[in-house]
Image (cartoon, helix red, strand yellow):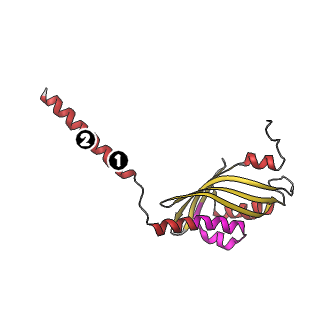
Amino acid sequence: MKKVMFSMLLAALSTNAIFAQSKTNCITKKTNKMETTQNKETALNLSKAIMTGKWDKVNDLLDDNFQYIGDGQPAINKQQYIYFMKEVLSKGFTNMDMQFHRVICEGNMVAVDYTNMMDNTGEYFGIPATGKRIASTGQFMREIKNGKVIAEWQTTNSYGMMIQLGVIPAPKK
C-alpha cells in the first residue's frame, strides 16, 4: 500500500513539474518598453505610408520575405501587396483617413482595430466609382522583426463596404 501511495505521489509531483515547465515555455519573450514602442510605430507607419502614397517608405518598412494573409485569400508576397495597395486600393479610393481605435502590442506583434474613411473616386474590383465617402472597418496584426514588418494578417468588413458602394442591398430592418 505504501508503495502504491508513494508511486501516486511521485506521479503527481512529476506531472506538476512538467506542467510548470510547459507553462514557463509558453511565456513570450519579454521586450522592453522602447522595443514595444518601436514595433507599434513601425506597424502604424506602414498604414500611414500607404494612406499618403509614400511607396518608397512602404517598400522600406516591409521585409523582403513579407507575407500578407487576409480575407480568405491565399498569401501574397511583398511585391503583390504593394501592387494591391498602390494600383487597386489607392486608385479606387482617395482622401484616406485611417483612425486607429485600439492598438495592442505584445512583443513583436501589433494588433490594430481601425476605420478607414475614404472617397470612392475610381474603379475598385470592377465596381465603378460612386463618389461616396465610405467607412472601411477591420483589424490587422503585424509581426515586426528588426524594424520591418515580416507578416500581416487582416480582416476587412467587405460586406459593409459593398453595401456602402451600392453593390448589394442593406439588410432589411
> Are the residues tagged 2 and 1 within 8 Å (C-beta)?
no
Viewer-closest of 76 and 4: 4
Q: Position of residue 107 (x, y in %)?
A: 47, 60
> Where, quadrant-wise, is the N terminus in this rendering?
top left
The residue most toward the top is 1
Q: Which residues are magenta?
A: 42-66
Viewer-closest of 99 and 163: 99
Secondary structure category for the residue under label 2:
helix
**Above or below, comparing residue 150 to residue 157 in the picture:** below
Secondary structure category for the residue under label 1:
helix
The residue most toward the bottom is 56
**Residue 171 is inside the magenta segment:** no
Q: Position of residue 60 (x, y in %)?
A: 61, 72
Viewer-closest of 105 and 25: 105
* Amino acid, disc 2: Ser
Quadrant position of residue 114: bottom right
Q: Residue at x 57, y 68 (%)?
A: 41
Q: Position of residue 42 (x, y in %)?
A: 57, 67
**Residue designated by label 2:** 14
Left or right: where 85 falls relative to 18: right
Q: Position of residue 76 (x, y in %)?
A: 64, 57
**Residue 61 is inside the magenta segment:** yes
Give the mark nearer the N terminus: 2 vs 1: 2
Dot 2: few (<14), some (14–19), or many (≥20) neighbours within 10 Å? Answer: few
* Amino acid, disc 1: Ser
**Residue designated by label 1:** 22
Dot 1: few (<14), some (14–19), or many (≥20) neighbours within 10 Å? Answer: few
> Where, quadrant-wise, is the C terminus in this rendering?
top right
**Above or below, comparing residue 157 to residue 32 in the picture:** above
